[in-house]
């Protein structure tokens, strides 16, 4: 709320976006399916490689295995290995897509960028937030200011500018702290 002191990284608001949850679940499901396909492709590649190795060993004895069978087994092993590579690339792409959705979900947690004080609160729990409507400047959900060092801007009439000296101490008061003088 307004006047609350916040620390850097502290959660200020948590937004809900059910569509992102659905996207994450879909991406997880797709990744699991592709990982299962990858496991099946690896198993087939291992079996085809084993078959090729055995046929090649058996072909060293003349007349046991036809030369064409060895070539067919070799090509099947190569094709299976290529299927493993393709399945691995698909699984990696699905992991990247899942990571992107998780990154988007991370934006639903609004945190304080620095230590400060909340000076504006334009939304309340349960309020619908979204992009600005375009009919004016966007209104922030919250405004946090860093108030450990403030700048005072004072208009000085031209007639008094000769009296202003560098390093001079100026005292002032602010409405937020009545009775207290600052310099």
Image: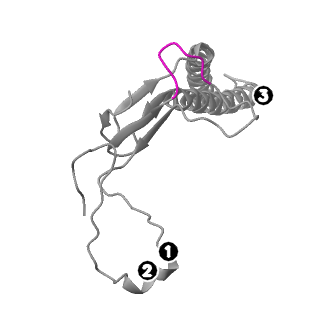
Q: Secondary structure at mark 3?
A: helix
Q: Residues within 10 Å of mark 2 (few under 14, many from 20)?
A: few
Main SS type for the magenta part?
Answer: loop
Which of the two residues, 47 or 55, is positioned nearer the viewer here?
47
Q: Is residue 123 magenta?
A: yes
Q: Residue at x 49, y 74 (%)?
A: 157
Q: CA distance from mark 2 to mark 1?
A: 6 Å
Q: Using residue 8 as the reference point, say whether residue 128 is left or right of it.
A: right
Does dot 2 land on a helix, a strand or a loop? helix
Residue in the picture at 41% in, 38% down: 119
Q: Is residue 152 left or right of residue 83?
A: left
Q: For the residue labelled by badge 1, is the local secondary structure a helix, a strand or a loop?
A: loop
Q: Position of residue 32 (x, y in %)?
A: 56, 16
Residue closest to the far front: 159
Q: Which mark is residue 160?
A: 2
Queried whether the magenta region covers residue 164, the answer comes back as no
């Amino acid at each position: 709320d307004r006047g609350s002191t916040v620390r850097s990284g502290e959660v200020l608001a948590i937004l809900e976006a059910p569509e992102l949850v659905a996207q994450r679940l879909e991406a997880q499901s797709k990744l699991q399916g592709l990982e299962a396909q990858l496991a099946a492709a690896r198993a087939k590649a291992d079996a085809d490689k084993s078959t090729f190795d055995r046929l090649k060993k058996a072909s060293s004895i003349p007349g046991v295995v036809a030369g064409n069978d060895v070539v067919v087994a070799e090509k099947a092993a190569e094709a299976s290995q290529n299927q493993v590579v393709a399945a691995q690339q698909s699984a990696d792409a699905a992991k990247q897509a899942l990571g992107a959705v998780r990154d988007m979900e991370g934006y639903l947690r609004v945190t304080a960028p620095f230590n400060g004080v909340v000076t504006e609160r334009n939304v309340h729990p349960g309020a619908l937030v979204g992009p600005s409507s375009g009919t004016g400047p966007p209104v922030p959900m919250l405004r946090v200011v860093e108030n450990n060092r403030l700048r005072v801007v004072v208009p000085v009439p031209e007639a008094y500018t000769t009296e202003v000296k560098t390093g001079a101490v100026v005292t002032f008061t602010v409405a937020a702290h009545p009775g207290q003088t600052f310099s």
